[in-house]
Amino acid sequence: MNGYVPQIDKLAGMDFYFTDFVGCGGSIKEKNEDFQVFEILDSSITNQISHAQTKYFKMPLYLLEKNNIDSIHAINKVFRKARIKLKILGLKDAKAITLQYTTGEPTKVIQNMDIGDVKLRLIGFLAFPLKKSHLVGNRFKILLSYANCDISSKDTGVLYDIPNYYGLQRFGSERLVTHLVGREIIRKNFRRALELYLCHTTKYDSKFSREIRNKCLDKKNYGNVLKIMPKGMDIERIILSALVEGKSDIAALRSVPVTMRRFFVHSFQSYIFNKCISRAIQEGQSLSKAKKDDLCFEVRNGFTLGKLQKSQGTEKEKDVIPAIQLPGYGLKNTEGRFEDITFKILKEERIIPRDFFVNELQELSTEGGYRQTTLMTHGFTSHEYNIEFTLPVGAYATSLLRELIKPIDPIKSGF
């Protein structure tokens, strides 16, 4: 838990490192090929794939490969090209090569599609659509660039217990804004939520981005800014267009795709989770060993999360990992140590659980959830600067890489 922690990490709630070794330095994602992600489905699903569409096996199962485009824009691109709505299990970062499973509409099936940075390949047919519970993890293949030491020289035996922080990409990376927008939505400050998304900058933002966003500080400029705003700022263009048309704050928020709207709220949940992890580390709490009244996941095969249970705090309990409740309107104080921390943080934020039910935007209401405290790194191998490992669903590879590299400037290092 030593070493300088960059300010941008702290702004995302990541206040500490877990490992004591000196980082290898270097960077990630110099090329998209350097960062590859492969989804792992539960074997009960892969054993139920039919090669032909039948009356029972109706649902087409595809493998979506994307390169230099995020998941939301990838499925939108497929829809524009083929008018097929795809359902994905998880969001994947843009600067990477990723392979993820998706199901489409049974009435319109395509064999293959290649539209440059997005490829779609039909695998077979299922009797049901995919659910998030069907995804058990991700396998990563990563090349580190400009590292100053061999990864195999580090004590990788501690990687299982690294804090399960949400990485910077959960918060918009250099902009670090999504959780701020989510916070204002939960507080019902909808105008402030819009202003933050349009105008907020950090020192890591590009000069051009800061110039555009500074122009948005004056509402009278909205029409002119819309004319010069680049296509890459598509969410900003949607919001500005709605405001220029005179739509209400709520209508302007609703003009944003619902997946992105929900992402704002989920990012704020992620921030509270990160702060809870950091506060627990600061207090000297163990993240990997369950204590009495902790909520815990059963663990199968080293990284597959099973059912949730309450710890009795006995030595007989094995193959469990503590869990933290994500804040939502269903958040309950179970008298566990992590719940105590979470409620203290929410009090500091001037938020109570029922605030997560948003009457005005009910589609953004969230009950909460549960997340394991550590990364549970599985199958880690390294050869010089090439590393491979598997993480449970929802865990961030960048949280592991952050510990190995300990970057001085995470944004310049590819985070």
Image (cartoon, grey):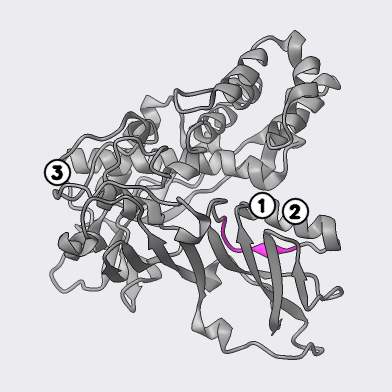
Using the image, tell me which numbered label, if any, was put on residue 76.
Answer: 2
Badge 3 or badge 2: first in the primary sequence? 2
- Tag 1, which secondary structure? helix
Left or right of 102? Residue 409 is left
In the figure, is residue 35 to the left or right of 274? right
Magenta stretch: includes residue 174: no
Indicate left or right for 255 with 374 as reference: right
Q: Is residue 289 visible?
A: no
Please tell me in which quadrant of the rendered image residue 303 appears: bottom left
Q: Position of residue 210 (x, y in %)?
A: 57, 20
Would you call the spot at circle 3 few (<14 residues within 10 Å), some (14-19), or many (20 or more)? Answer: few
Instruction: Estimate the spatial distance between the alpha carbons at disc 2 and disc 1, rounded to whole Å.
Output: 6 Å
Location of residue 123 with respect to 51 vertically, above or below: above
Question: What residue type is disc 1 on?
Answer: Ile
> Whole-percent x and y of residue 214?
61, 14
Q: What residue did someone put label 1 on? A: 72
The amino acid at mark 3 is Gly
Q: Which residues are magenta?
A: 86-91
Q: Which mark is residue 284?
A: 3
- 382 or 105, nearer to the observer: 382
In the picture, the quarter occupied by the N terminus is top left
Say if mark 2 contacts mark 1, CB within 8 Å: yes
Q: Answer with the quarter of the image where residue 55 lies.
A: bottom right
Q: Is residue 330 above or below residue 123?
A: above
Per the model, the C-alpha gap separating discs 1 and 3 is 39 Å
